[in-house]
Image (cartoon, rainbow, N blue to C red):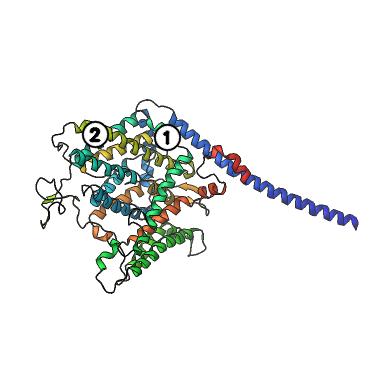
Amino acid sequence: MTSKMATTKTTVEQCNDDSLKGTQTTAKTDKESYVGSSKDANDDDDQQEENLHVHQGYGRGIVADVKRTIFVHWKEEMMNFNGKTIACSFFLYFACIAPAVTFGAIYGKATYNNIGAIEMIAATAWCGIFYSLAGGQPMMINGGTGPVLAFTEILYKMSESMDVPFLTLNAWIGIWVCFYLVLAAVVDLNRIIVLCTRFTDEIFSFLIALIFIINAIGSPFSTVGVAHYFHMDHKAHDPYEDQDYYSHWASALLSLIVFIGTTQLAFMLRKLKFSPFLPNQTCRNSMTDFAVVISILVWSLIGNAFSEVPIETLNVPSTFNPTFQCCDETCQTSWPNDCYGQEAPYSYRSWVVDLGNLNGKTWVPFMAAGPALLAFILVFLDDGITWHLINHPQHKLKHGEAYNYDTIIIGVMILVNSFLGFPWLVAATVRSLNHIHAMAEKTPDGKFLSVQETRLTNLGIHLLCLITIFALDVLKLIPVPVLYGVFLFMIFEIWGGYATKIRFKTNSLFTQNTHHEHTILKTN
């Protein structure tokens, strides 16, 4: 009896020891798995950085980029059409058109209507279509950015102090910027991207994300954001201030509900893919792909359903014409600000900028090389860091990078936009990263499994922007709080993923993993 009890006790202890060893082995495996994946990612980073660091000879980097991307993958990227491409095109259409209208309005104030919403929408449309067909990294989306806007505002003040027409000075600087970008591509200057560590990437993306969050909730520097609707003097309340039925509190509360509802519904529908709801997996996948589009449509209907509680909608021009309206045939003064009492404008400015309109200052084209160098550095770094973020190994992109080739493409677009009086567009970080997330297959906890790399979404997004030019009144039906909700969703989507959670967990956010692997081991 005693022997049996001893045997039983020994067996139980062995089972417990085996169980404990199994648990420890599993935990150890998890540690090794994470550290191993971290090392693999860092090895990939190092390999990619090493490839960029090696000088390939003058012009050879451009040729290598074209051979690696367009020659190999262009046909495949133009043929892989499915439901996900449709859903992503509509989602990112709203994500692109809203900043285009907003940036256009700000450009109008900063440049005295020399550049406005119409120019921004037109530039977004043609640059996006051109890049989707000719660009080397189809997951990138071009758009207006804050740094370029700030430079343009400074440039306008410079043109006033020099007594030179703004669009002419802008065009000459654009020519020099294009020259610098082509030169940078030829000498393979993009190899300095090796200096961009994970720390650099995350600080840059964090600042961009912070701007989006502040603008969605309420900017302290402007009247942009849903919180400002609670102020009685907000411009959205002005058209209704004489209406007895109107309450700015009711309008602000409805705007807040629409704002939160848009974000929340998009996330709820996104999670359906891994839920037991709906008849089959095909339906769940479709609802997940169209989550943001459905949320926009639902909350746009709700926002416009209460006639006695109106909320702000997109303010866009009614016709497709240049924003600058002339007082007379010289087109040197702006209607109506410079010609009070004149009932209608004489005409609109020409679509093509006159490079010779220098007010007799023939030295301006040469002087423009100085400011253009600063603009080049701004554009080069903005593009380079965004490309570095896009091509991070965690995104599992397989079609290769094309830094040098795309530098030339960006230069060409800036050159054409300068001639037409359009704003300069560069790589838009948040929109590009959301493009990748929208086309990705992920695990339930947000880890990337694969990404469908396609040109069709980029083409579809900007074809919709082009169509919008001829249907501007439709945009006026979209409530602005809905778009604020989309902005908030976009930030949470790119900053709420698997990699971010892991880096928060291991206290390694804003650090370089290769320098902190011992921290990961100790934490786990």
Residue 463 drawn at (x, y percent):
29, 51
Question: Which residue position holds label 1?
Answer: 193
> For residue 368, which numbered disc appears in the image?
2
Report whether 73 appears left or right of 47: left
Farthest residue to the left: give it: 329
The residue sitting at 35% across, 70% down in the picture is 250
Q: How crowded is mark 1: few (under 14 residues within 10 Å), some or many (20 or more)?
A: some
CA–CA distance between discs 1 and 2? 27 Å
Name the side, left or right, on which 174 lies relative to 32: left
Q: Position of residue 131 (x, y in %)?
A: 31, 43
Q: Above or below — where is 508 with respect to 65?
A: below
> Is residue 452 visible from the viewing direction of this image?
no
Quarter of image, res 228:
bottom left
**N-term-proximal mark, 1 vs 2:** 1
Q: Which residue is drawn at 37% across and 30% down?
A: 189
Q: Do the residues labelled 1 and 2 touch (CB within 8 Å)?
A: no
Amino acid beneath label 1: Ile
* Mark nearer the viewer, 1 or 2: 2
* In the rendered image, the vertical position of residue 118 relative to residue 194, given as above or below: below
Q: What element carries label 2?
A: loop
- What secondary structure is found at the residue carrying circle 1? helix
Question: Which residue does the image show at 36% across and 42% down from the upper left?
Answer: 75
- Kindly give the residue lying farthest to the bottom in the view shown: 245
Residue 49 coordinates in the image, percent (x, y): 46, 33
Q: What residue sits 24% from the left and 35% below the top?
A: 175
Q: How crowded is mark 2: few (under 14 residues within 10 Å), some or many (20 or more)?
A: some
Q: What residue type is labelled 2?
A: Ala
Left or right of 343? Residue 310 is right
Residue 62's disc number? none
Extreme residue toward the top, this view: 57
